[in-house]
Image (cartoon, rainbow, N blue to C red):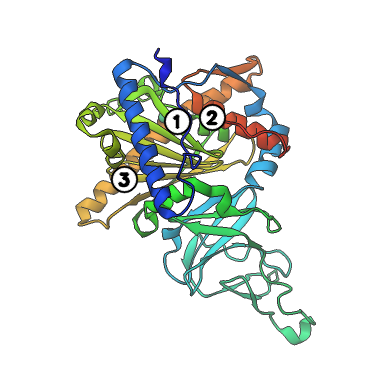
């Protein structure tokens, strides 16, 4: 194993690249090129990115109910999470509903083009405001007593108001969650009183994703699948060690198994994978390799804690993971996008086939295995699992889960 390949993760600490848009673009080019070059070396020399040591994680971390509740409180209900993609509510008046960790959400597109993330609960006596999954309307009427709300969440009218009594303006508007929309992704914090700066949290990973311009891409559609504990599922997005054994006929023919390269921005991660034809990039100038993403190497970009973005030439998959209802389950919404609108019905149908294919891979292969892993861990007879030096991204992920679960923000943050 060639150990000289260990490098420091690239971020804005890179000398001279600290301010303004141009340095950011430069930093991304350097990052992509360096990761691609290292993937080339890994394939040539039979290496992969390496952590300093192996790492054990207690099995109970995946199965314990109180641990799971701590993670939900300190991570999923405290940090920005992906609640939807922009194209789901493309036009003013568009809305969608989704329930995350028992919180019913109503996500609406305003006249000015911004998104609002509201609680889908009437402020009179708590009725679900709308049971529709999506639609287009400017006003919502509660099915219980008929109070009406505008799509910005403000109370429009109390039914039969003269008999009801006084309601101060602004006092009974829908609960509104802080949100941030950029690069085609809508993030929100499920705590209306949070003081977290969502954009700062998303940081450099969002700079990178926003530069892709996914907000202008064509939405192919989404698929919903169910799987195991959210960390069992997340682990599967973080390494390609399993490609050969678990995806012998789907992923492995196209992508090298157990060849990964990692980079991190805060708790968010890039995972680089080498395509089987990566060696063709040896003829490129190393400084130009950044232009070849999806043409010899691929990245999975992960926003901690619930997003994995896989950009492939045929289609892009944005996985939105929603834990629960308990530690043993998660629901994942797979959103599919393409940079260009479909040119024909055949084109659209090919994209839907690709979406189904990727859904099947995640559902039948990754989550199918995940459910069996879950069963093994639930026996309580295996004390821990072990992550190899090659599973560097998994180690980093679990250190961040622990950092947030412990709730001590003065403790040193994990480093890749
Ligand atoms: S609960 Fe909505 S109007 Fe009464
Ligand atoms: Fe997989």
| Distance (Cα) linking label 3 and label 2 | 29 Å
Mark 2 residue crowding within 10 angstroms, few (<14) / some (14–19) / many (20+): many
Which residue in the protein does label 3 denote? 315
Numbered disc 3: secondary structure: loop
Of the image marks 3 and 2, the number of the one nearer the N terminus: 3
Which residue in the protein does label 1 denote? 262
Residue 110: x and y, percent?
51, 71
Q: Determine whether, in the image, residue 282 is placed left or right of residue 28.
A: left
Q: Residue at x 64, y 42 (%)?
A: 75
- Image quadrant, ligand 1: bottom right
18, above or below 371, in the image: below
Task: In the displayed orientation, state which residue is furthest to the bottom.
Answer: 162
Q: In the rendered image, is residue 222 in sight? A: no
Numbered disc 1: secondary structure: strand
Res 179 → quadrant: bottom right
Disc 3 vs disc 1: which is toward the camera? 1
> What label sits on residue 280 in the rendered view?
none
406, above or below 16, in the image: above
Mark 3 residue crowding within 10 angstroms, few (<14) / some (14–19) / many (20+): some
Disc 3 vs disc 2: which is toward the camera? 2
Q: Are marks 2 and 1 in contact (CB under 8 Å)?
A: yes
Q: Residue at x 70, y 38 (%)?
A: 69
Residue 327: x and y, percent?
63, 34
Count of numbered labels shown in the rendering: 3
Numbered disc 2: secondary structure: loop
| Distance (Cα) linking label 3 and label 1 | 22 Å
Which residue in the protein does label 2 denote? 416
| Distance (Cα) linking label 2 and label 1 | 8 Å
Task: In the displayed orientation, state which residue is furthest to the top.
Answer: 1
């Amino acid at each position: 194993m060639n150990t000289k390949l260990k490098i420091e993760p690239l971020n804005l600490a890179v000398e001279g690249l600290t301010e303004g848009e141009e340095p950011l673009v430069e930093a991304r080019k350097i990052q992509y090129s360096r990761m691609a070059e290292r993937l080339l070396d890994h394939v040539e020399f039979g290496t992969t990115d390496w952590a300093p040591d192996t790492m054990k994680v207690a099995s109970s971390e995946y199965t314990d109910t109180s641990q799971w509740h701590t993670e939900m409180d300190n991570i999923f209900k405290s940090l920005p999470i992906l609640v939807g993609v922009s194209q789901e509510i493309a036009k003013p008046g568009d809305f969608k509903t989704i329930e995350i960790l028992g919180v019913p959400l109503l996500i609406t597109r305003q006249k000015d083009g911004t998104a609002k993330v509201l609680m889908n609960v009437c402020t009179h006596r708590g009725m679900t405001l709308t049971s529709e999954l999506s639609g287009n309307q400017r006003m919502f009427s509660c099915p219980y007593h008929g109070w009406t709300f505008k799509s910005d969440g403000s109370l429009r009218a109390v039914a039969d108001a003269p008999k009801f009594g006084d309601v101060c303006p602004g006092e009974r508007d829908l609960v509104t969650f802080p949100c941030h929309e950029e690069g085609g992704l809508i993030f929100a914090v499920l705590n209306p009183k949070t003081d977290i700066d969502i954009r700062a949290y998303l940081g450099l990973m969002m700079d990178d994703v926003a530069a892709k311009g996914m907000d202008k891409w064509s939405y192919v559609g989404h698929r919903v699948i169910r799987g195991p504990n959210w960390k069992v599922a997340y682990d599967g997005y973080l390494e390609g060690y399993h490609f050969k054994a678990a995806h012998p006929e789907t992923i492995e023919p196209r992508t090298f198994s157990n060849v990964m390269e990692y980079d991190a921005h805060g708790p968010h991660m890039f995972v680089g994978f080498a395509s089987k034809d990566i060696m063709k990039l040896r003829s490129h100038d190393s400084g130009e390799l950044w232009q070849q993403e999806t043409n010899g190497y691929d990245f999975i970009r992960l926003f901690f804690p619930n997003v994995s973005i896989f950009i492939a030439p045929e289609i892009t998959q944005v996985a939105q993971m929603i834990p629960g209802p308990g530690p043993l389950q998660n629901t994942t919404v797979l959103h599919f996008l393409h940079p260009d609108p479909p040119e024909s019905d055949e084109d659209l149908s090919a994209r839907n086939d690709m979406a189904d294919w990727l859904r099947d891979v995640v559902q039948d292969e990754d989550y199918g295995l995940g459910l069996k892993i879950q069963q093994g861990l639930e026996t309580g007879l295996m004390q821990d699992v072990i992550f190899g030096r090659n599973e560097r991204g998994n180690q980093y992920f679990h250190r961040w889960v622990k950092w947030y679960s412990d709730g001590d923000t003065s403790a040193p943050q994990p480093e890749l």
